[in-house]
């Protein structure tokens, strides 16, 4: 695996490790434990995520997903809700025998 791919994979593993800790965050040490990576690699990964607007360092020094990540999640949820509503409309028309 190339260095670039390896670094990208590391950053993505760290981003996934933050799941479920948006309010309380995780420490560097906790991220090391969860990802089985070195403290220096976790620090670099977090710097990348922060620079890209995908993570923040909380006042307590812990790391969490940024509002930007939450906006991505919210946009996905809204998109899925629109699709679900559209499918329900189509199913209702089918059940009612609509031809258009």
Image (tube, helix red, strand yellow):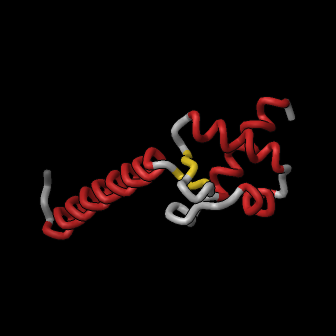
Tell me the quarter of the picture where residue 3 sits: top right
- Relative height, residue 6 to residue 76 (above, below): above
Q: Is residue 31 left or right of residue 93?
A: right
Horizontal and vertical percent position of residue 1: 86, 35
Q: Is residue 85 left or right of residue 52?
A: left
Furthest-bottom residue in this view = 95
Horizontal and vertical percent position of residue 31: 73, 58
Q: Nearer the viewer, residue 83 or 44?
A: 44
Q: Is residue 98 left or right of residue 9?
A: left
Q: Is residue 62 left or right of residue 66?
A: right
In percent of the image, x 50 and y 64: which residue is there?
A: 23
In percent of the image, x 56 and y 46: which residue is there?
A: 55
- Relative height, residue 84 to residue 57 (above, below): below
Q: Nearer the viewer, residue 31 or 86?
A: 31
Tell me the quarter of the picture where residue 85 sits: bottom left
Horizontal and vertical percent position of residue 48: 65, 36
In percent of the image, x 85 and y 50: which residue is there?
A: 38
- Relative height, residue 5 to residue 38 (above, below): above
Q: How many callouts does the rendering have?
A: 0
In percent of the image, x 52 and y 61: which residue is there?
A: 22
- Relative height, residue 77 to residue 1 (above, below): below
Horizontal and vertical percent position of residue 30: 74, 63
């Amino acid at each position: 695996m190339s260095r670039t791919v390896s670094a990208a994979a590391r950053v993505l593993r760290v981003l996934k490790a933050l799941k479920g800790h948006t309010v309380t965050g995780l420490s560097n040490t906790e991220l090391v434990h969860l990802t089985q990576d070195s403290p220096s690699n976790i620090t670099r990964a977090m710097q990348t995520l922060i620079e890209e607007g995908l993570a923040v360092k909380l006042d307590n020094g812990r790391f969490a997903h940024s509002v930007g990540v939450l906006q991505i999640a919210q946009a996905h949820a809204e998109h899925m809700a629109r699709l679900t509503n559209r499918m329900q409309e189509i199913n209702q028309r089918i059940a009612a025998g609509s031809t258009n």
